Amino acid sequence: MKGIRQLAEHLNISIGTVSRALNGKPDVNQETRRRVLAAAEELGYVANQSGRSLRQGETKVIGLMIESSKETVENADNFFLGVTSGLQSVFARHKLDLLMLPCPSDEDPHEYLKRMVARRIVDAMIISDTQRVDRRIDFLSRAKIPFVALGRSLSASNFPWIDLDFEGVADHAVERLIALGHRRIAITAPSSEANLGYLFIDSYRRALERHDILFDPSLVIRIRSSEQGGYQAAHELLLLEERPTAVILIYELMAIGLYRRLMESGVMPGRDLAVIGFRDAPRARFLQPSLSCFRISLYDLGVALGRMLLATMPAYREFYPGDGRNIIWPLELMPGESDAFDVGAMV
Amino acid sequence: MKGIRQLAEHLNISIGTVSRALNGKPDVNQETRRRVLAAAEELGYVANQSGRSLRQGETKVIGLMIESSKETVENADNFFLGVTSGLQSVFARHKLDLLMLPCPSDEDPHEYLKRMVARRIVDAMIISDTQRVDRRIDFLSRAKIPFVALGRSLSASNFPWIDLDFEGVADHAVERLIALGHRRIAITAPSSEANLGYLFIDSYRRALERHDILFDPSLVIRIRSSEQGGYQAAHELLLLEERPTAVILIYELMAIGLYRRLMESGVMPGRDLAVIGFRDAPRARFLQPSLSCFRISLYDLGVALGRMLLATMPAYREFYPGDGRNIIWPLELMPGESDAFDVGAMV
DNA sequence: ACGCACTCCGTAAACGTTTACGACTGTAGG
DNA sequence: CCTACAGTCGTAAACGTTTACGGAGTGCGT
């Protein structure tokens, strides 16, 4: 089956009518439409997207850009896959498809994005891992490509984004630990330029100062957010002359490595050192002792992202009237065993 | 900037010449080419991919289909991201781009694939998670779409695939455990129709029979390959009246849940029960005790996949003369602490 | 018999490229 | 002076759709 032309010939109908029948246009006879659909099904005809999108100027595809840097690969968990399922549930209602664009690690994300957008392969974009200043945001705004960002940025004052509530998490974690009697609280953050780290640390610092605890830079451990990073973080913690009694991890998988390094030195997490994790609970719940962790529903986050994106697109805006506003996504603490002790009982 | 027409007008050159200049065709004056390239750069012109691929019938994009079923989302690790980096390193040489197509969990993968292929959005496909009988393979063969599968299948006798050496792993693991004195060895397998499980169990059974050990079906635990699955697997193991002394995990993340459940019952992995994992080591190395695990280089696997795919495509075949043959990908055992004891010392 | 509204369908133009073909130079060789 | 040829470039057709427009047919009321 080559194209709509062959299909039309096979039916002895003009190609215009065939096209209208397939696309559900009103001015076509019921019986004719039935025949066309049947023949299309039988011959396995499906419209060529190049021709179609050339004519209509749209592709019905949304792109989700993810980075495949070394760090991302190491970190990889179910985050993006979980989000995609929420996204797809929204897009499916409008017969939109989702495409993931993995940016090669040796290419500038901005250049990659430009290339992909130029291809006109997607109608809109979702970008993630936003940097403090991120040229992609300027570019997309200027080119008038609908987009939504997963992560705030300083690059523009007004663009659609959803971000996790890092500040709330850091704040909540610090408050909780202080209530348990902790005064020396360490925290981990990524070494990259990702915006997330800055917000995390700032909020941690403010929470401490609220309780008149001096901010000690040596307690901020900048390290890769992986199991290995967790191992190294623990190593650094153990080297400090005045050892902290608690640590907040920015990524829960780090706990695996952290636990191991601690136990190698006979330090028992949840007894000698309180640990709180961040981002996803199910995984960490199976550690021993189970990790206190801030939970997030990836599916719901995906749904919100999808709705916000469609709200920026003229063709779909009407369906999502209230979804244009930026969201700081709240997280819920799932208490585990890893911080369930009162530091007063120590020493 | 609208299209090549505007660019041509701006230069007072015909659009044919502009196109030739941009595409590096030989019959265009050096000076003209320079001017065209400069103007294109300045005005930010990039060819519309719809028009281009409509004319040439190719998109320079390779699709990688991944499933986002509930099981896959739970399992998600760095597997696909790791493979993509290898793939991209190969594709980059030919200016090909990689696209990930996440199949929604509520859609039949076969239908999804058909829709995506019909879109003519990709020139070739990489499919993964092949089932025992997998209609996608028939479809792609019949439609003459170049493809390569990550995983064997019974669906066709002759198609390009690479698969992990499940048989070698099961065989090696059983041999190793028997050499350490184990006689009762449990094994986990996925409950799905994925082909992988069958090969894994078959080989396990054959290895046992080689040593005159009776195959006991109750030692085969069919369970989800996630942390939670690991937890449940341990639970089932503990319920067996005659408890095994070793267990082989088909997915190393299961070890996290397994460890927890064992420790809850005071059973110490690596001392009371030998554990061997499968698929990726770096993650499992940070468990305590560290997991003996079969290692795989995702990057290299991606490279091999990419080469094999290109070897099936007429336009690139010449560059990859020896890459057409199917590969059973070997894995290397990284010994850890989780099976480093002689069962003879027990009891 | 005529006009009108309505339903259905065919025609052809457009979308933005690439490329086969031929035309136009200028130069070299006879 | 004629021919051959290489180097450039313009022209126009083609790729597979969608859709604005108009025309043919029917039924109905006048």
Image: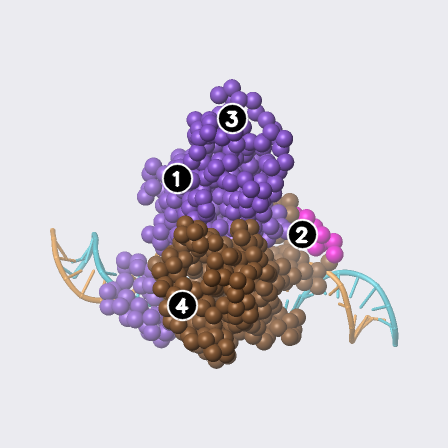
Chain colours: A brown, B purple, C orange, D cyan
Q: Which residue is mark 2?
A: A36
Q: Is residue A83 left or right of residue A260?
A: right
Which label sits on residue B334? Answer: 1
Q: Nearer the viewer, mark 1 or mark 3?
A: 3
Disc 1: which chain? B
Q: Which residue is mark 4?
A: A220
The foreground one among B167 and A170 is A170
What type is the residue that disc 4 sits on?
A: Val
- Could you tell me if residue A298 is visible in this image? no
The residue range painted magenta reads A30-40
Discs 4 and 2 share one subunit: yes
N-terminal of the pair, mark 1 or mark 3, is 3
Q: Is residue B120 above or below residue B249?
A: below
What type is the residue that disc 2 sits on?
A: Val
Q: Which residue is mark 3?
A: B183
Q: What residue is at 43 percent from the left and 64 percent from the top?
A: A244
N-terminal of the pair, mark 4 or mark 2, is 2
The part of the image, by quadrant, that contains residue B190 is top right
Gap in angstroms between the C-alphas marked 4 and 1: 33 Å
Disc 2: which chain? A
The part of the image, by quadrant, that contains residue A136 is bottom left
Q: Residue A196 appears at what percent x and percent y?
A: 46, 69
Discs 2 and 3 share one subunit: no
Taking the magenta stretch, the answer to whether it contains residue A206 is no
Q: What residue is at 64 percent from the left and 47 percent from the top?
A: A41
Disc 4: which chain? A
